Amino acid sequence: MFKKIFSNRSIFRCFSKTSPNRTSVRIVEVGPRDGLQNEKHVVPTSTKIQFINKLSDAGLKSIEVTSFVSPKWVPQMADHSEVFMGIKKYPDVSYPVLTPNVLGLNAAIKVGAKEVAVFGAASESFSRKNINCTVEESIQRFKEVVNEAKKHGIRIRGYVSCVVGCPYEGSIAPSAVAKVAEALFDVGCYEVSLGDTIGVGTPGSISKMLKEVTKHIPVEKLALHCHDTYGQALANILRGIDMGIAVVDSSVGGLGGCPYAKGASGNVASEEVVYMLHGLGIDTGVDLSKLIDAGEYMCAVLGRPSGSKVSRAMLSKKC
């Protein structure tokens, strides 16, 4: 039985080339925005600022700070301007903000944002539920934001949601993902993050999706954004790195989820990603101890234990 299982060399080939081929990976920390956006109790502005400062001090080079969206839809982000202006900005760290429309972009420009993010979904149903428009309409909408941002010399990062599965439609065709990702890239996004919004992906489905998307966009312009609903996030990230991905989105303490995707658990924990990559000899520039401290700080504020197994294990050794 075991001989038959382990005779499949392709299984090993998926994970055997990672360490020698990749020397560094950039972590995009999404905890302050994606991690907190659907928390029921509003986190104080001063606490958010302290949280982000801790993340900067941990060595992260890209931290998504907030979302310039209407507080009617996301009350947690109502203090976006105060948070962005209040954080300590390290010269070698980027602090992108989410701007779903031109109104949000203008507010971000007003407070001095240098990088923004726009998004679309590969699922028609999810797009309608999330931003109340069709996929094609969303493409036109983010084109307006990107074109306006470029006039101000602002960098733009793109997101694609539901890249392998949708809570309403089930499996998503890789070609649908490629269509939206290519639209984001062609309009001027320097990088496109591919999000497994409900965490149903496996190394197999992630492989199929990446093979299709990389026919249209260079792999060095892509990132992976994995949720850990089915416990597959680390395996999916490892598979992505094996295929050339060098940027990974994650959330300290495993904070987050999607308010429009019922049952989707949080993003993969940044602590887990950093611990795995360092174990492979891949540099992230992140101080794991300081990262754990930042995660513990916010989890204490939220009144619950960290969703990171690495954090819990390492802190238990100090007891």
Image (cartoon, rainbow, N blue to C red):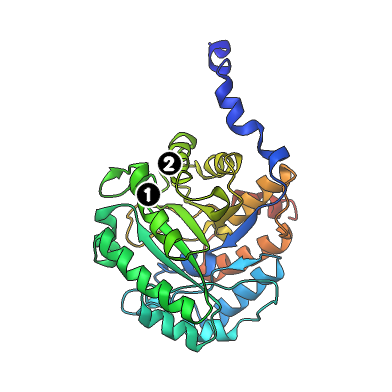
Residue 310 versus residue 106 in the image, above or below:
above
Tell me if residue 250 can be seen: yes
Where does label 1 land, which residue?
177
Residue 153 versus residue 9 in the image, above or below:
below
Task: Kindly indicate the quadrant of the structure image that contains residue 141.
Answer: bottom left
Q: Label 2: state its secondary structure.
A: helix
Residue at (37, 49) in percent of width and height: 177
- Left or right position of 228 against 86: left
Q: Residue flagged by tag 1: what amino acid is it?
A: Val
Residue 176 versus residue 52 in the image, above or below:
above
- Left or right position of 92 against 5: right
Going from the N terminus, do you reach mark 1 or mark 2 first?
A: 1
- Left or right position of 18 against 256: right
Count the marks: how many? 2
- Left or right position of 312 against 136: right
Residue 87, label in figure = none
CB of mark 1 within 8 Å of CB of mark 2?
yes
Residue 22 is situated, as x and y percent measured from the top left of the image, at 69, 44
Residue 138 is situated, as x and y percent measured from the top left of the image, at 30, 65
Where does label 2 land, which residue?
212
Give the distance between the C-alpha atoms of the residues marked 1 and 2, in whole angstroms: 8 Å
Q: Quadrant of the C terminus?
A: bottom right
The crowding category of the residue bearing disc 2, from other C-alpha atoms within 10 Å (few below 14, some 14 to 19, many at least 20), is some
Residue 271 is situated, as x and y percent measured from the top left of the image, at 63, 54
Q: Residue flagged by tag 2: what amino acid is it?
A: Glu
Q: Which of these two is toward me, 291 or 299?
A: 291
Q: Label 1: state its secondary structure.
A: helix
